Image (cartoon, rainbow, N blue to C red):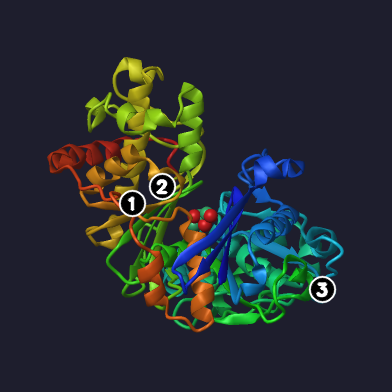
Amino acid sequence: MFLGIDSSTQSLTGLLIDPATGQIVQQTSVNFGSELPQFGSPSGFIPGGKDGEVHGDPQMWLEALDLMLSRLSAVADLSKVVAIAGSGQQHGSVYLDATFNERLAALDAAGTLSGQLSPAFSRATSPIWMDTSTGAECAEITAAAGGDEMIRKISGSAAIERFTGPQIRRFFKTDPESYARTARVHLISSFLASVLAGKDAAIDPGDGSGMNLMDLASSDWSDLLLDATAPGLRAKLPAVAPTQSITGTIAPYFSKYGFSSSCKVARFTGDNPASLVGMGATAPGNIVISLGTSDTFFAAMEGPKTDPAGFGHVFGNPAGGFMSLICFRNGSLAREALRDELGVDWSAFDVEGLALTAPGNAGNRMLPFFGPEITPRGDFDGPVRKGDAEFESGANPPVQIRALLEGQFLNMRLHSQWIGVKADRIRLTGGASQNNGIARLVADIFQAPVERLAIGNSAALGAALIAAAAAGEDLAKLQAVFCTTAEDSRIEPDRSTAAVYDEAIVSYAGLLKSNPQLIS
Ligand code: XUL
C-alpha cells in the first residue's frame, strides 16, 4: 500500500491506496478547528492577524499528524505501507533553529511530535498562503532583482505577497535576531517530510516554485533572487530534489503506528501540484478547477508561459515539465460567508436553488470578495453589488447566491485568459465540486464539459500516487486506474447560455475596473 498525506488549510488527511486491487483502502481526516480547538484556529489559521498577517500554528500540524496516524493505524495495517508522500498548503513556511536535526534524530515514541519538536521553532507561528502583509517586501525584492519581468522569467511568478521569499524577507526585517537564529526554513510540505523521515528533507520543484526563489530552468535556488530576499538564505534552505524521489526511510518514532522500518518517505509537494497528479491531469489537455478554502485554476503546460498581469504562476509539474496556476483567495470562505449571512444551507447553492434565477442573473453582478483578494489584487472588505435596488440592499437570497457564484467563475474566466487555451474539458475537484448546481454553472460560464472524479480528495490521492511512482510504479498506469471520472458526473454546457456569459464577462470586467478597492 502507499500512503498520501495532505496537510491543507483546514484539515490533515491520510489516504491509503492499494495498486494491486486499484482500491482506496482507507482515508481519514483531522479537522483543525473542530478537533484541535486548543489551538484557537477555527478555520485552520490564527484569527485577528494585523496588517494582512495570516499565520498558522506548526504545533497544530504536528498534533494533527499524530492524531491522524493513530486513527489510521486503528483501521489499517500500516506495516504494509511501502512508501509515503504528501502535499501541503503551498507557500507557508516553518522556521527552525540549529537543534532541529538532533531533535528529529532523537524522537522518542513515548512522547508526542509537538512536545519534542516545538522547542526547535525559531518562529512560533508560520505565515500561510492567506497572508497579504508583504506588499513592501515584494516591491523591495522586485527592485533589487531588476524588475518584475526578470523575477517572472526566473521564478515563473512576479513577487507575490503570499510567496515564501517575500515572507522570509519580512521576518528578516521585523525580527532579525530570530532570523539569524534560524538554521532552516522549510515549506509545510518539506517540514512534514522531514518529520516523517527523521531527517532534513529537500523541497520539490512543484512547491519550490511557489517561493519566488527557485530558478525554473535549473530547479535550483537563484542567487539573484536569494540575494534580493535576505542575507545568508541559501544556507538556510534545503536542496531542491525531483518530486518522484525518496527522502529516506521512516523514522523509528512511527513504529508505534505499525509502520515497518523499511517504509520509505518520498518527496512531499504542494497541494495544487499533488492535485494535478490526483486529477489525472499531468499531461496537457485538461483544466482543473479546485474549489477549496481558496479556489484554484490549473493545468499542465508545454512550456513555462507566464502571466503578464502578474496574477498567474508557473509551478513544476510533479510528472515533469510545468503547470500553470491561478489562485483565488475568496473561495469557500466567500461561499461560507454568504451562506451564513443569508441563513441558508448548501441546497440554496445547488440545482434547485439556482433554478429560482436565470443565467446572467438579470444583470445583477457581484464582485465576490468578502476579504482581501489576490486575483485581482484588492483590499476588499465585503462584496460589491451592482444591480437593482433590492439586490444592492442585500435582499433576495437566490439572486445574491447566483451573483456570488457567477462573479466567482466570471472572475476566474477573466483572469485565466492569459493561458491562451480554450478549455476542452474541465475537471472539478474540492468540497463544492459535488454540488451539481455549481458544476453546471462552471460548464456554462466556460462553455466546456465538466467532469468530477470518483474520489473527492485529489491532493491526498495525488500524494499517494507520487509515493507509488517514487517507489518505482508507473504513474500513468496508476492514474488510469485511480483517476477515473464518477459515473454520471459529466455535465455538458448549455450552448444557449454562451452569449449571456460573453456579455456578462464584459459587464463584470467593467464593474471590476471601476472599483476603487482594486489595487492593480
Ligand atoms: C496556491 C495557494 C493556495 C494554497 C491552498 O498558490 O496559495 O491554493 O495552496 O492550500
Q: CA distance from mark 2 to mark 1?
A: 8 Å
Which residue is tagged 2? 376
Which mark sits nearer the N-terminus, 3 or 1? Answer: 3
Q: Quadrant of the N terminus?
A: bottom right
Circles 2, 1 touching at the beta carbon (< 8 Å)? yes
The residue type indicated by label 3 comes to Ala
To which quarter of the image does residue 346 belong? top left
**In the image shown, does 162 or 34 lie closer to the viewer?**
34
Which residue is tagged 3? 98
Up-down relation of residue 517 to residue 112 (above or below): above
User: Tag 2's secondary structure?
Assistant: loop
User: Quick one: label 2, few (<14), some, or many (20+) residues within 10 Å?
Assistant: many
Circles 3, 1 touching at the beta carbon (< 8 Å)? no
Q: Residue at x 85, y 69 (%)?
A: 108
Q: CA distance from mark 3 to mark 1?
A: 43 Å
- In the shown orientation, is residue 83 left or right of residue 258? left
The residue type indicated by label 2 comes to Pro
**In the image shown, does 508 or 104 lie closer to the viewer?**
104
The x and y percentages for residue 426 are 29, 55
User: Quick one: label 3, few (<14), some, or many (20+) residues within 10 Å?
Assistant: some
Which residue is tagged 1? 415
The residue type indicated by label 1 comes to His
User: Tag 3's secondary structure?
Assistant: loop
